[in-house]
Amino acid sequence: FKHEEVLELARTYTDQAFRVLDPQRTEVRYNGEWLAKLSFADLIELASIFPMKQIIARRDFQSRMERGESLRFHEALYALMQGYDAYALKCDAQVGAYDQHFNMLAGRAIQEHFGGAPHVMITNPIIIGTDGRKMSKSYGNTINIDDEPFDMYGKAMRIADEHVREYLELASSFSGAEIDALAEELRGGGNPMAVKKLLARNLVEQYHGEASAAEAEARFRQVVQDKEAPDEVPEVRVPEGLRGALWVDLLAALSLVKSKGEARRLIGQGGFYVEQTPVDDPAATADLPAAGALVRLGKRRYYRLLP
């Protein structure tokens, strides 16, 4: 990445952080302030603090080596860099997920090496994806801080039943007593959907406010549970040359799907509707009436196609 691209990425992270932190009480620093000033001799001194055995003993490094994957030398330097950040900032406390445990230990060691007091480490569990796997964009199982209210609510409703308690503990603003009561309700055979609704609304309230949470909940009930079209539906004009084309071609040409292949899969799997009537034949043609047609892609994506 170029320096300007890194700064732009950093800005997106601070924008997300300021949904939780008060920007007036938060100081943002870039570690280039101090890392760029280090000489090669400084790097050697930092590296001498850590035995190589300790570096390669990291669980993630061990797992990769056991799988026969390569391990690049510069990857081992990351802990030194993050550890030096703690020293440069004279940290009193450092907060991070479990996977940052070694890097935070490195910071304590570097602080002590230079005569400072080691900082306090506060580690948190890593929140998993909505399907129980590692949270990853490639798995499509993320709930993002900057998601729109309806999307955030809908994703929360897809959390696997057995992982609702984890989300209550790690992501909600409920009190410990409230979480215990909800968990007991689940253990007693309560309806997981009812608890998920409370969780989903709580998540949206934290990042978008109470009014947006109420609106997202109402829209979810209307669109997903009652399978009704939302009050406001995006309108898309269909060029004259596409009228009467195959739905597969039309959906791709209007960029409502990423490709014709995706359109075929969507239609073939019963995920495409015209005026609430399923279209499951990839060879079906788009015969639009003069007034246009309401179409649904998947469970929640509605469009009004106009000739």
Image: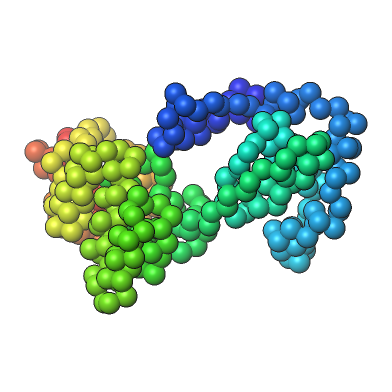
Query: Could you tell me if residue 303 is visible in this image?
Result: no
Residue at image location 48% in from the left, 56% down from the top:
127
- The picture quadrant where one finds residue 163 is bottom left
Q: Is residue 45 left or right of residue 269?
A: right
Q: Is residue 131 left or right of residue 234?
A: right
- The picture quadrant where one finds residue 119 is top right
Q: Position of residue 28 (x, y in %)?
A: 56, 27
Query: Could you tell me if residue 108 is visible in this image?
Result: yes
Residue at image location 36% in from the left, 59% down from the top:
176
Which residue is outermost to the bottom?
A: 188
Quadrant, the C terminus: top left
Pick the front one: 249 or 155: 155
Pick the front one: 216 or 201: 201
Looking at the image, residue 272 lies above or below residue 94: below
Looking at the image, residue 70 lies above or below residue 214: below
Pick the front one: 191 or 281: 191
Quadrant, the N terminus: top right
Q: Is residue 14 left or right of residue 246?
A: right
Pick the front one: 5 or 18: 18
